[in-house]
Amino acid sequence: MKKSDWFKVIFIFSLLGNLAFFQNHERAGRQEIKNELMNSSIYRDLAQLEEAIQYQIDHNWQNETLVTEKLDDALDSILLNHGMEEDNKKDDTFWELLEYLDQFKYSEEPFDVSLNEEQRASFIDLGKKLRSNGWSFEKGFDLKWEVFESKVKGLIAES
């Protein structure tokens, strides 16, 4: 083979290698963006839950249903992420969070709920735990998986 033919072969293999590298890099980037978008819905719903609990505390529990609706929204977001996750470790984290929050669900129907004093106290405690672990609009969001996972572990560990 001529020297110029070898250069052509090396050039073609170099192009194919670079193409494969960039496609893999793009795929990984898309997966990370998908995770950040999905996790942001959980952040938003848990921050809204914390805010709804604080609002009810400040307004003498005038609309208890708002808290149960926000809890239901958070559970739905977690369940959606749990169902779409392909990584077993991340899937386990979503499942732990789902099981933890599910214990605060007092009825299958989130509308027209009347909470008793023990249930209100439980929600007040949940609001404090959410706030202390950074699930609040005041703290801002960091969408990296490691931060998300540490917040979940911190919330569950406070129980």
Image (tube, grey):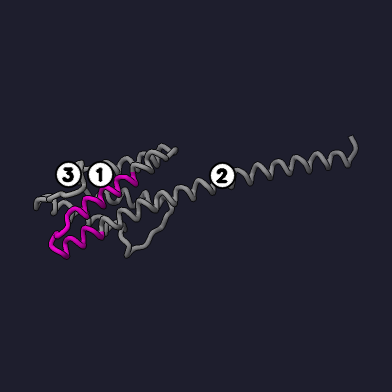
Return the residue found at the far left. 117
Q: Which mark is residue 100?
A: 1
Identify the magenta region. 51-78
Identified at 77% across, 41% down, the residue is 12
Query: Badge 3, how many Cα within 10 Å: few under 14, some, many 20+?
Result: few
Using the numbered discs, state the Cα–Cα distance from disc 1 to disc 3 in whole angstroms: 13 Å
Q: Which residue is mark 2?
A: 27
Identified at 34% across, 45% down, the residue is 78
Q: Position of residue 73 (x, y in %)?
A: 29, 49
At numbered mark 2, what does the secondary structure look like: helix, strand or loop? helix
Using the numbered discs, state the Cα–Cα distance from disc 2 to disc 3 in whole angstroms: 41 Å
Q: Is 43 rendered above or below residue 108?
A: below
Q: Is 13 rendered above or below residue 74?
A: above
Task: State if disc 3 and disc 1 touch (CB < 8 Å).
Answer: no
Q: Which mark is residue 75?
A: none
Instruction: Please tell me whether mark 1 or mark 3 is closer to you in this view.
Output: 3
Q: Is residue 28 left or right of residue 71?
A: right
Query: Badge 1, how many Cα within 10 Å: few under 14, some, many 20+?
Result: some
N-term mark: 2 or 3: 2
Q: Which residue is mark 3?
A: 106
Q: Position of residue 140 (x, y in %)?
A: 37, 62
Using the numbered discs, state the Cα–Cα distance from disc 2 to disc 1 in whole angstroms: 33 Å
Under mark 1, the amino acid is Tyr
Q: Is residue 146 magenta?
A: no
> Quick one: 69 or 123, which is closer to the camera?
69
